Image: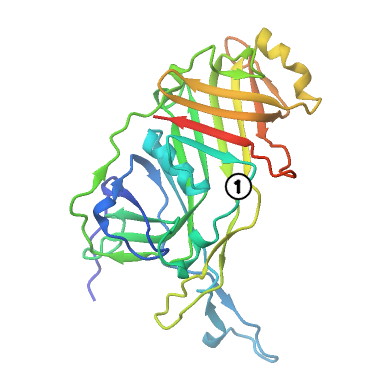
Amino acid sequence: MAQATNYFPSQDVSVFIQDEVIVGTTPDDSALTRLQATSFTIPEASVPLEFSSARSGQYTTTATQAHHSQGTKLWTFDTVLRGTPFSVLKACQAVFEQGSSTAELDNDYVFDVAGYRVATGSGAKTHDIRFINGGADTTNHNIELKGCIGTGFTLSSDIGSEGGELVCTINWATGFMPVHSADDISSPAYDEGTPKNIRNLGLTTTELDSANDMVVQSYELSVQRTIERVHYSDITDGQFHPFGYVMTSPFEITGSMTVIRNDDVHDLLANFYNSTAVDLRIAESSDFAIDINKAVLGESTVDNGGAILMQTIPFTAVADEDIDGSNEQVLGITIA
């Protein structure tokens, strides 16, 4: 058999996304949108290999001891996107089901079990993601990932990197094996939005504890959760599709700001050690804001490696306990 001589340039790969109607079912591709992806990871259709115990007196491993664990696999991958409004809202939609221009995560959030259950029918909260030209075969040159659920995202911007542009990284998982296909996309939509930029931050609208206007050089916000697949259903097609997904941890909303060390930073000094929560707002003049009603500040560090002193302030978003049924916003992201 002759050796294959084909190969696929990584620069040819494009990433498309679409909301699913039914969990794990390929939707009509009329609503596929091409993402402004700068990098990504592509999961392969492979699963963990396990070996059962050898019998007594056996000194070699036999083929019958080998078992691929198809029913427990959760394929994970990331998409790194330019921080356009579409990218940011898609991240919010994927992780806490809020895809409007004002996305809110409240303390009364409840995981939508029905929206992530395969047998529910319509009303899915999952996504279909395709890597066009990401396959390994000349004919079946695309990879489709069905039933994708967001496990987290990160928004970051640095005045000295990427021209100050916002970067949006979305973390994904799926219990459906990647599918190699030859399907072409006939008339997709394109995310043509402009990325937000840290150089548009306003001094009077980037604040810690309301009155303290920070001179921000970089910032990062991370929203993470733990997702697990539930067992597997019909095995007749050899795919071991999951029943669905469950969320098995609270959200972890963390981040940091690197700011010029000045009087406003000094005024926050007590908050670095007395556990008092402060409000936090990072806002641009171009219709973009991150609001945290209560943030507890972590162990701050001073950077003296540059021309002026800088301070990095880590934070964790917290909320009042929802004992009396009251609703409180923990995180708000506004973007247009």
Q: Is residue 275 above or below residue 10?
A: above
Front one among 217 and 7: 217
Front one among 52 and 45: 45
Give the left or right position of residue 182, taking residue 269 as reference: left
The image quarter in which residue 276 lies: top right
Q: Residue at x 71, y 24 (%)?
A: 300
Q: Is residue 76 above or below residue 315?
A: below
Looking at the picture, how far across and down is residue 275, in whole percent? 79, 28
Q: Residue at x 48, y 17 (%)?
A: 201
Front one among 245 and 51: 245
Give the left or right position of residue 308, taking residue 32 as reference: right
Looking at the picture, how far across and down is residue 326, in whole percent? 68, 40
Q: Residue furthest left?
A: 186
Looking at the picture, how far across and down is residue 100, in whole percent? 43, 39
Looking at the picture, how far across and down is residue 33, in whole percent? 29, 46
Q: Residue furthest bottom?
A: 57
Q: Is residue 285 above or below residue 35?
A: above
Q: Residue furthest right?
A: 274
Image quarter in which the N terminus is found: bottom left
- The number of numbered discs placed on residues in the rendered structure image is 1
Front one among 50 and 111: 111
Q: Label 1, secondary structure: give it.
A: loop
The image quarter in which residue 11 lies: top left
Q: Amino acid at mark 1?
A: Tyr
Q: Is residue 65 above or below residue 272?
A: below
Q: Residue at x 56, y 68 (%)?
A: 230
**Residue at the disc numbered 1:** 109
Image quarter in which the C terminus is found: top left
Give the left or right position of residue 91, taking residue 229 as reference: left
